[in-house]
Image (cartoon, rainbow, N blue to C red):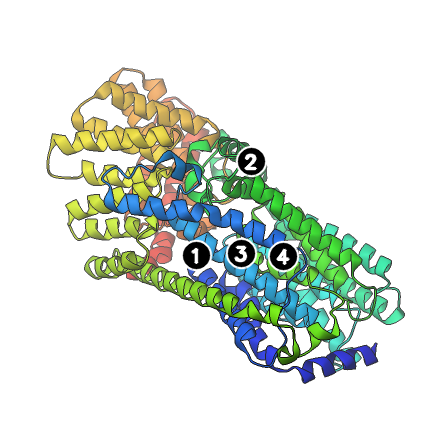
Amino acid sequence: MESSSRSTQATVAADPVPLLAELPLLIALALAPVTAGSFEPLPALLLACLVWVSALLRLLMPGVTPLRRPSGWRMVAGFLLVALLPLAGAVVVSAIAKGSPDGVAPPVVAALGAITPGATILWCLIYASLAAALWLAADITARGGAERLIAAALVGGLLAGGIALQQYLVELKAGNASWRSFGTFANPNFLAGGLVPLLLLTLGLSPRRPEAFKPGMWLLVLSLLTATLTAGIVATGSRGGLLTLGGGLFVFLVIGLMRGTLRAREPLVRVGILLAVLALVALPLLRVVGAREGASANAPATAGLCAEEERAASADSNEFRVLTWRGTLAMVQSRPVLGWGAGSYETAFGPFMVAGYTRHAHQGYLQLAAELGVVGLALWLGLLALGMGRLHSMPRDEEHPWVAGVAAALIAGAAHNLLDSIWFVPATALLTWVLLGIALAPQGASEAEAAPASRAGSRPRSRQPIAAVIAVLLLAITGWHAVGRSLLNTGRGLVESEPKNAVETLQSAASFLPWDYQVHDRLRRALLNSFRFDEAQQSGQRAIHLAPERAAGYSFLGQILSGSAKGAEEQIRARLVLELGLKHVPNDVQLWYELARVLQTVGEPREVERAYRRIAELEDSPVGRVRALAEVRDYRFARARMELARIEEGARQPDAAFAHRSRAACLLSARRRLYEGNPAAYEFTGETNPRLEQDLRQEERTLWEGISREYRRRGDAEKAVLASKEVEAVDASWGRLQEAMRPQEGG
C-alpha cells in the first residue's frame, strides 16, 4: 500500500504543472457548499467561471499531457446538446419581447421550450460548466488525483456542516428544539442532500491512509469530518436525508466488502470507529426529527377555535409532494420530448399546480423531464448507469480505494432525488457531476497518452486550441452574466430605500441581461417607487413577455394599471391583464385578489363577490389547505374572507359572516405564529414587509376582539376567553415583530 502511494506521488511530482490547473476547480468544489446552496444564480455563475479558468489552464499549459476524454463522452455531449437546444429559441423570444408590442413567439420557437429565455440561457451556461467539470474530474482522476477532488469537496462540507450545527445549537439554547437547520442552503432538505454524499465520501477515504498522516492523526481528521457532517445532517430534520444516509451506508459497506477494501484489519477498524462516531453524534440529535413529527400548525391557545389548523405539518409536507408530482407529471405530458426549457420550472409550473406554488418539483427526475423532456431524462439516467458500471469495473487495487464511497454517494444522491430536486441545487450539482467524472475517468492509459504533449500524437493535441477557444467564449459569457446578476442584486437592495439609484443600477443590469424577467420585474418596482408610471408599465409588460406563465407578472402589471390616475380606461386595461393572467394560471390567489379589487373600483358587485368566493374555494382546496413545511400563509385568503363577511352581513346572514370572520382570524393567527417560529421563511420569499405585517396584526386583533364579544353574546365563555388570549398574543407579538423587522427597515 505504501509503495503504491509513493508511486502515485512520484507521478504527480514528475508532472507538477497540472496541479496549478486543478486549483480553480478544487477551490470551486470547496466553496460550493457554503456559497451555492440557494436559488441565487450569482454564486453558481462565479463557480462556473472558476471551472472555465481551470479548463483553460489545463488546455493551454505547454509541455503537459493532452486533456483526456472521459468514458461515455458522447453521452455527456448528447445531454449537453439537449440542454442547449432551447437556447436558440430563447434568443428569438428575447428579441421578440424587445421589439414587439405583443411579444408572441412563433409556434416553432415555443416548441423548443424557450418559455423563459433568461432562465434557459442561465442554465445552459451552468450545464456547460458542469460538463466541463466532469471532463476535468475524469482527467484528474486518470492522473491519480481523485482523492484531491474528494478532499476539496470535504473542506466545503466541513464548513457547511459546521454552520448548520451552529444554527441548531443557537436555536436549541433559545428553547427551540424542533429547529431545522438549513445552513447556507435554501432549505433543510437541500442541505441534507448536499451533506449525505460528503459523509459517504468521508467513509470512502478511510481504507487508505495518506503517508503525510500518522495513523492517529488520520483517524482524528476523519472522525472530525464524520461528526460534523452527521450533526449537520441530523440537524436538518430531513427524513429523506436520513433514509438515504442509511441506504448509502449499506451500499458503502457491501461494495467495500465485495471489492476487498474493507477486509483488511486496519481499514475495517477505522470504518468501525467512524460508524461509532456517527451513531454517538446522531442519537442525541434525533430529537429534532421527533419534534418535527409532532409539530402542529397552531399552539394550544387556539386549539379550541381553529380546528382546521390542527393538522400535522409533516402530513401536509407528504401530501404537498404528491400533489406537486401530479402537477409536474401533467407539465411533462404537455411537452414530453424537449420539455419547457432548462431552468424553466420555477416560472412554467404555475398553470399545472394542484396544491400551492413551488419553485422546484420535490423530485429531481420529474423536474428534469419537465425541463429537458424525456430525452434529457433518458440521457441523464444513461450517464448515471454508465458511471456506476464503470465504478464496478474499476480494478480492485490499492489505487482505487475510494470507489465504494463514490458509488455510495452517487446512489444516495439518486435516491434522495426521488423526494427532492437535489440535482438542481448548484452546490450539489457540481459535486454530482465531479463524482460522475471520477467514475468515468479513462482507464489503462498507454505510454503515449501518459507522455508529455511534446511527444504525443498530433491528433489529440490539435483539438486543444478549439476547445480553448470555446472555453474562452464561455468564460466571457458566464462572466458577463455574473456582472449582470451582481448589478441586479445591488439594485434589488436599493428598490425601497433609494429608488432613483435602484433605477439606474437596474437599467445597467438590463443592458447586460435584457432577456431576464427578474431584471425587468425589479426595474418595474423601482420605477413605480420613483413615480415613473409609464416606464413601470413598459417594464412590467416586458417581464410578462419574458415569463408568460408566471402569475406575479400579470398581478404586478395589474396593480400598476389599477393604481394609475388616468381613470376608467386604465382600470379596464388592468382587468384585461388580470383576466389574461388567470387564463394562464387559473388557481393563483394573487391574481383573483387583484381582480376583485379592480372590479370593486369599476363597480361590479356581483363579479366582486364571485372573485372573493373563488378565493374562498381555493382556500378550501389543496391550493390553500396543503402546504410545504414552513410555507408562508397567504394573507389574501384572510382578507377575502373578511370581504365575504361584509357581503354576508349586507345580505343579513350573520352566522355566515361570523364563520368567515372566524376563518380569517385563524388564517392570520397561523401566519403570525409561523412568522414567529420561522422568520427565515418570510425573508426567503420576500414577504418581510413591515407595513403589511403591521396592518395584518391590527386586522387580526380587531377580528379576535369581535369574535370574543360574539362568543360572550352566545354564552360560550370558554371560547370567549380563548379569543381574548389571542388578542393578548397579538399584542405580545408586536414588539417581537418590530425587533425582527428592524434590520429590514434599516436596509
The disc labelled 4 sits on which kind of residue?
Trp
Q: CA distance from mark 3 to mark 4?
A: 35 Å
For the point 33% across and 40% down, the residue is 552
Q: Which mark is residue 325?
A: 2
The disc labelled 1 sits on which kind of residue?
Glu
* Residue tagged 4: 73
Q: Can residue 161 be seen by looking at this rendering?
A: no
**For residue 392, which quarter of the picture?**
bottom right
N-term mark: 2 or 1: 1
Verify CB contact (< 8 Å) between mark 2 and mark 1: no
* Residue tagged 1: 40
The disc labelled 3 sits on which kind of residue?
Phe
* Residue tagged 3: 182
Disc number lying in front (3 or 2): 2
Nearer to me, 544 or 738: 544
The disc labelled 2 sits on which kind of residue?
Trp
Q: How many residues crowd mark 2 within 10 Å: few (<14), some (14–19), many (20+)? A: many
